[in-house]
Image: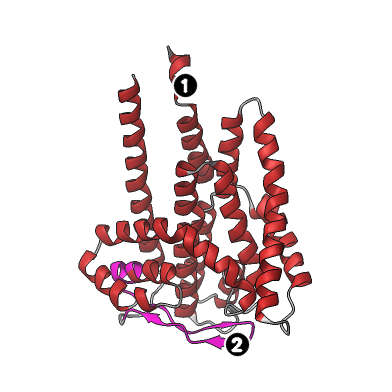
Amino acid sequence: MLNNIVQNHLDFIVFICALLAERFLPLVSWYHPNHILSAIFKAIGQRVYKKTDSKQYHYLAASLASTLVLTVIMIIVVLLLEFAFYPELLSGLILYLCLESSSINKKAIRIAKLTKKNQKSTARELLKPLVAREVKALSNPGIIKAVMESVILRTARHYFVVIFIFLLVGPIATLAYRLLTLIQQAWRTDIAPDSSFLTPLKLILFIIEYIPIRLLALTIASLKASKKSMHYIKHYGRHFYQKNTGWLLSVCSASLGVQLGGPAIYIEQRFNKMRVGVERLPSADDVPKLLNTLNQARFFWLLIIISVEIIRAVLTF
């Protein structure tokens, strides 16, 4: 009977094991496959991108480059899944490699502790791999604001959206989405955020993330300061340069009572992004509060997923 239960719910067991492994046994970034892939994607971007080219060429070059890379990797993975003896286990491995949350949280806590000790240089060095913006001139509040925004957006994309796609569509779509985010991150290190070269990727990711990002934002809004959060979404989120990002920053700003967003420097160019909120600037003590808020949202949706699985098991029993 136990064997039958395991066989019938093997997908869900593997899913839970992948979440636990990412939480307690995260891979070090230096030997994570994402590190190697990011280096490859960055080299491809440097080879293809030329600032002086026209917008139409940028659209075409970015679309073809990302499609070619994605197609090659996806064909290999599909063949592995097709011939794998236990494809469920390989699917769990794909989910484990696509998830990224606990390592970011640990870095955020460490950066917060460094700013408390006024060790800004070390904090900036730890922050640099987490953001695309320049960090060399950031003050302590600027460092905290940047790391909080990075934690919010990375947790949303690399955890909640990944799980959403995995449960609804499967491991192949999850891997494809994660590769697209890696390509965008790799290209943004040398390319300005308003470049037409990044537009195709931005559009695709915006469409994919539209529903899961808003579900996460509404979850955070329902946990704390719901009226204020909805006001911020209407006042800031709908007018932010990227609406998915605007929704998340709005609800987090409202729930924590701090100011997020604002101007940032990318590749020695200042971009006057909208400030979200009129409250105080964030401090190091706000980082644990943010992580606690995100953990509450994580726990809430995990309970829903487990409840759905239990109901499904009872109905099929």
Residue 64 picture location, percent across and down: 70, 63
Q: Looking at numbered disc 2 in the image, what kind of residue is underneath it?
A: Gln
Q: Is residue 190 visible?
A: no
Answer with mark 2 or mark 1, whichever residue precedes in sequence.
1
Say what secondary structure mark 2 lies in. strand
Per the model, the C-alpha gap separating discs 2 and 1 is 55 Å
* 62 magenta-colored: no
Q: Is residue 25 left or right of residue 315?
A: right
Q: Is residue 248 above or below residue 21?
A: below
Identified at 33% across, 19% down, the residue is 317
Identified at 41% across, 65% down, the residue is 287
Q: Looking at numbered disc 1 in the image, what kind of residue is underneath it?
A: Val
Q: Is residue 2 above or below residue 87?
A: above
Q: Residue furthest right?
A: 47
Comparing 285 with 59, the one in front is 59
Q: Quadrant of residue 51?
A: bottom right
Say what secondary structure mark 1 lies in. helix
Q: Is residue 207 above or below residue 165?
A: below
Q: Is residue 88 visible?
A: yes
User: Which residue is the site of mark 1?
Assistant: 6
Q: Is residue 303 above or below residue 82?
A: below
Query: Disc number at residue 276?
Result: none
Q: Quadrant of residue 232?
A: bottom left
User: Which residue is the site of mark 2?
Assistant: 269
Residue 307 picture location, percent across and down: 31, 35
Identified at 43% across, 69% down, the residue is 245
Identified at 50% across, 67% down, the residue is 150
* 267 magenta-colored: yes
Instruction: Find the magenta span and give its range.
Output: 251-277
Residue 269 picture location, percent across and down: 60, 87
Residue 121 picture location, percent across and down: 59, 76
